[in-house]
Amino acid sequence: MSGYERIAFSFIAVCLILFLPPLLDGVARKIKAKIQLRQGAPILQTYYDLVTFLSMEPVYPTERLAFRLAPYIAFASAVSAALVLPYGRVIPVSFTGDIFVFLYVLAMVSIAYMIAGFSLNNTYTNTGANREMMIMLSIEPVLGLAIGTLALNAHTLRIGAIPFAVTFTLSVLLAYGLLAYSVYVEGGFIPFDVAEAEQEILEGVFSEYSGYLLGIFKWALMIKRFALLWLLSSFISIPLVRNIASGALGGALILVIQLMVLFLLYTSIAVIESMNARLRIEQIIRQNAGVFVCSIAVLVLAALGW
Amino acid sequence: MKEWARKITDEKVRERYVNEVIERFRDKIIRVERNADNQWMIEIRKEDLPEVIGYIINHPEWKETQLSTMVGADERPLRGKFSLIYWISINGASGDVFFGIKTYISEDDPKFPSVTPIHPGANWYEREVKDLLGLIPEGHPDPRRLVLPDDWPEGVYPLRKDFHYTDSPKREFTDETKYPYREPPKGTAVFPLGPYHVALDEPGHFRLYVKGEEIVDVDYRLFYQHRGIEKIGENRLTYDQVNFIAERICGICGTAHALAYAQAVEAAGGVEVPERAEYIRTVMAEIERLHSHLLNLGLACHDVGFDKGFMDAFRLREHVMWLAERLTGNRKTYGMVVIGGVRRDFLEYRRSMIEKVIRELREGFQKWADQTLSTKTFVKRCEGVGVLSYKDAKRWSSVGPWARGSGRDLDARRDHPFAAYKYLDFKVPVYKEGDVLARCLVRAEEILESIWIIEQALDEMPGGDILAEWKEIPPYQEAVGFTEAPRGEDVHYVMTGEGNRLYRWRIRASTYNNFPALPDAMRGNSVADAVLIIASMDPCYSCTERVQVVDARSGKVRVLTEKELTELSRKASRGV
């Protein structure tokens, strides 16, 4: 791999991580609007919203530093999570064991959300933070086990290297299913958006945020969704073309396919979202507990070599 | 008249009820008077109130008896006393009877024994007469303020006749002015909901006492929006004008209120309404029910994040709004009902338009219902949530889909046939589960029934006049008018007065009877469902809170800067 390819693709990666998520959000909003037979906001609306938020002074409901820092922590964590994933043939940041880093920084986004929620004496933010915690605790193990199963199969602890090495067995296919489920839940899409439920708890933590802090926080959550879906899209698209793609051109091919799969995933999620109602937290926890048991079984299958 | 209606309104059936009460309390009854076709007023002494009312309401054989309204009036200028009338109705398609249990209370001893311990449904009514007339219910389990604002001075009773409608007592809002909310049960946190909250369509304050996400108990404070409608109706407006104010009690079920008021005056004054007008009233009432139920079902979807169902329901509703606009000139607040008939006729060529709209609505709605009920996550959220037991629904005298979802078989359209319902056939859907889903299903079925009612009414509508002439309403006649609003029975009581004016007007919206049951339905549920349960009652705050003249001007006027205001609101929210 040439140094130029590395630099070029890393640059593209950073641009995608920062500026693609609002577009995806805009597309999803448009799709939902179309399903509801509405005209809907322009596709670029999420950018406009972000620009508006970022240009406004926030109102601070508390003096606590945690409240001010939380959006930045969430933002940094989300970007870091996205950086350990492959873009074309290039992984911007890669080292042995980054699989744990990925899970860790992903959890950090939720933790920042919780820090913010618990830093205030407000039942709405507290409930939001509480729900975020329960969801994270119930789904993060599933995500970990799914990635772990794939890592076991690929014999690597670099998350970005897994799709280049994974071979398809029964356990791997099941792990893909688990991965898709945990990405969906962790992304907080309906019916799992309880932590930011507007009608129930006034969007939880966001009820106290405003101005650029709100903008950064929302942006961070969008990047988190991007990272999760990019993970899934990489795991789907790279195995398809890894044998025919070589050189910088091959990298570009992979990237294009990754992007296509990403849009496809986001579109289908928007459709699923508009066809569902929000679940209650205890219903989600019960469901996730069942899925967790399945994921252990899948790991055992993988360990047995199936 | 259809066979079923003839059975219910049969004289013999009615007399059986009345005779039994008279037999039983022969020595306690002072006077019996028949006010209107189906209304008997029985005067007793105030000491006997709990016994007589308890007997009628808890009668083991009489079906779905309930406290329809209670009226306190200042009759000092007439008789030197205050009066109270408890209006109790028999429902369940077993006889069209209203009992008005009346008693007089002297000014020197303004106490009366509370009925609430026997029938909790009297809770709000008795607190209201305490607030507005200064009549004190003795033995009331919850004598806190209900209607008047926290800073209203003690001893000023706005519904007394010596309180002029322009009067404004001096009110002082200090740091000590606080509503005595119940102490949270041990180990619970307070989850405040409202007065302003995205999912509440009107201001109402709920205090949910929660353990984790479970609601242990609920307290509430309402009546943020009194507009003094009753006082204005009694002092400033003529009979005809009141009709239009009555329609403005509510932005959703205005026709139900206008109709209830018109029927009350017609009953008191003996005005005969032409048959064609009755049919037109029926069609308008059903069109109103269609749009109201579609609104509520849409909001139920919205509250659980299912926006597809929400948008689709509102799109269907829009066609109903357009239809109403074509028929009456208004999307809402039709202004159709006037005393003696209706204001506008349906032109013949409009008939096909109505038929087309409701035919499309039926198809569209069935599709909507299939889609929504096959959305598993939606059903999961509604099933088993917010269960109101039959016992609780009965004990609070609940009405409408809120009560029918809990197995109460009552519907004013069938039990006390008014307008043209007596000439039509329709079903009253009743579900026993008592959860949010049951109430949604009741509403869904009622939409289809409403469409069927409109179709029949259009087919059978006779020709002729639409407005009866009436010259004078005899003074000091009392009667109630009742309709089945989309949310349940609406009851208006009128006592006619001199000079083309009402002496007393008492509005009772359906939510007034439903609201007190809300804590029972919410206990044990999750905070996540609070809003959904409230919405499933389909509350109508402004209806409920019509009563008193409130002057918005306070003693102090000071302009706050934006910063000060923000600081203040933050401080206030911290105290919660």
Image: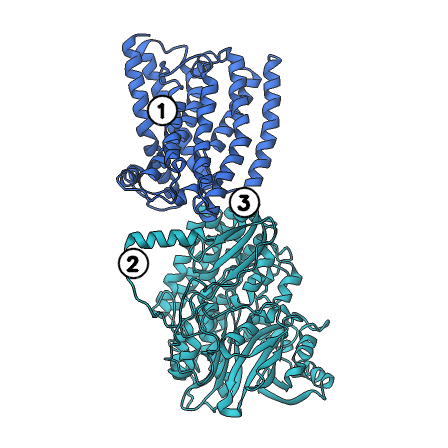
Q: Left of B427 or right of it: where is A30? A: left
- SS at mark 1? helix
Residue B173 percent coordinates (x, y): 40, 66
Residue A77 percent coordinates (x, y): 40, 27
Foreground label between 1 and 2:
2
Chain painted blue:
A
Residue neighbourhood size for the residue with mark 2, other residues' Cα within 10 Å, grouped as few (<14), some (14–19), many (≥20):
few
Quadrant in the rendering for residue B24: bottom right
Quadrant housing the N terminus of chain B: bottom right
Marked residue chain, label 1: A
- SS at mark 3? loop
Q: How many angstroms separate mark 1 from mark 2 (CA)?
A: 53 Å
Foreground label between 1 and 3:
1
Please name the residue shown 60% across and 14% down the image: A303
Q: Which residue in the protein does label 1 denote?
A: A259
Dot 1 amino acid type: Leu
Q: Which residue in the protein does label 2 denote?
A: B560
Foreground label between 2 and 3:
2
Dot 3 amino acid type: Ser
Q: How many angstroms separate mark 2 from mark 3 (CA)?
A: 52 Å
Residue furthest top as drawn: A2
